[in-house]
Image (cartoon, rainbow, N blue to C red):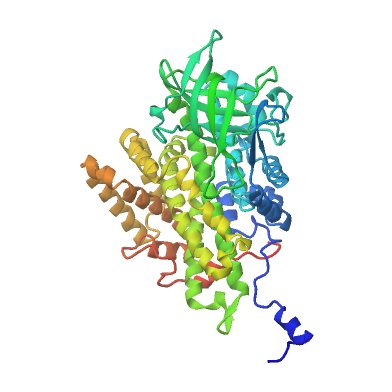
Amino acid sequence: MGTPNSGSRAAIRTVTNQAPPLVGHNVVTADPALTEAVERHASAAVVDSLVALGAEAGSEEAREHGRLANEHEPRLTPYDRYGNRVDEVEFHPSWHWLMSQAVGHGLAAAPWEDDSPHAHVRRAAGFMAWSQTEPGHGCPISMTYAAVPALRADDALAKEWTPLLASRFYDPGVRSASTKLGALAGMGMTEKQGGSDVRANVTSAVPTSTEGTYTLHGHKWFTSAPMNDVFLVLAQATGGVTCFVVPRVLPDGSRNQLDVVRLKDKLGNRSNASSELELDGTVAHRLGDEGRGVRTIIEMVAATRLDCVLGSTSLMRRAVSEASWHAAHRSAFGSLLVDKPLMQNVLADLAVETEAATALAVRLAAAVDGRADPHEAALRRIALPLAKFWVCKRTPAMVAEALECLGGNGYVEESGMPLLYREAPLNSVWEGSGNVNALDVLRALGREPEALDAWITEVGRARGGDPRLDRAVEDTLALLGTLLGDPVQLEVQARRLAGRMAAVLQGSLLVRFAPPEVADVFCASRLGPSYDGTFGALAGGDLRAIVGRATPTLGG
């Protein structure tokens, strides 16, 4: 056997038939489903205001910061060198870069202080686009956004905290809020023994001599973003479960008694710090009346559920972008993968799933902008748990299929797909698992008849647009009518009902607004009687056009 000469070695090391990195594209303008939805519910001017964000989100710099933030996970330092308790969480500089950009783009609480009519649609679109850089830092951004509507239960506390939370200045560090240009919020609801059943919480709230001020004593099993400046926390007061505002640092500059027991070792979301906290004499200010803590904090939960939908949609979009980009540049068996009929079928199916999620996500954000309208408020009440259940539940399977489109390359960390895969189940767990959200749909149907009326009105706006959608609406209402007469079966079938209502709502939006080829494929697959949930089982339609809409192009 001969020894390879230098020429053959050069040939061995020559790289061919590998897709180039997906960098240098505009995440906003390259996503027609997103831009069309924003124009529909807001305006072209709102799209224009997001172009700079989209360019930055698709840049090589942003992707590299996202990689580094996950490679260098946060570290907890409970004590300083002298033995003083400090509970500092240290982050890589890339985390701070991502946070600074997100806050600077107004993705935290800025919309609540913005008097423009489409502030929440703009923020939702920006959140979906920017989260494609790195999903973990979306948690503190989301908590900060979500805290404001709950804070409005107390005018004084809202006035104190909202301007800081709505600031576009990222100002990290454990310091008194009075010295900061901006602040971030977190949440502490669940405990070891209760989980989603927060009425089982045992953390106690003891009133002090100062009206509205208490001390908290207990343990919080999951506290989002322990490095943040203020937390909304549930605890048991004399009158029952109550909501409290807990500052990280007291007005005199001393640290509040918030001991970080440990950081959670999570499946994904590695860049973000999730913690257990011990509270022992922790100063807290009551938010709302005693015994009404769940009702008070539910506005925060509603806002974070919206972000779960936005975050899952962002993961879908990043995944289908990577898959379609790879297929457009990778050849096999004599031609590009994207030209292979079966691969085209798979990519089109993934693209339709993403378009349906995008249409629903932006519609929900529009309902927040129009929350003073009774229909929008009622639709938001039922559509949020529907979308939270359905979109977040669809994401893991969708991301897994997109990863498979890259073959072995997709299973390698450097591709970025494993990060998306680990992240994919998170939003289905956070702010209530699938069961919790399906049961919340039942609660809305049972207690708030205007919620069902809003769903019927919304899907009815597409009546006559596609016979398959019309049949699906009728079948869903018939199922609901049957189940309402049998309380036991109603709960047993809650997931089936929630999934069907969510898919019909998505279908109605696509029939009204999406290109005909997208709506046709969705109705034929998701709403047809033979749908088995397998991606790549489409029976017809202009698949090339659908894939073309999903494939990014450099510079746009």
426 relative position to 490: left or right: right
338 versus 294 height, above or below: below
Q: Residue at x 55, y 23 (%)?
A: 245
Question: Which of 28 and 173 lies nearest the eye of the viewer?
Answer: 173
Q: Residue at x 42, y 27 (%)?
A: 201
106 relative position to 517: left or right: right
Coordinates of residue 145 in the picture (x, y in percent): 58, 36
Question: Which of 534 and 246 lies nearest the eye of the viewer?
Answer: 246
Q: Residue at x 36, y 48 (%)?
A: 498
Q: Residue at x 35, y 64 (%)?
A: 532
12 versus 405 height, above or below: below
Coordinates of residue 174 in the picture (x, y in percent): 69, 29
264 versus 469 height, above or below: above
The part of the image, by quadrant, that contains residue 96 is: top right
Quarter holding the N terminus?
bottom right
Quarter holding the C terminus?
bottom right
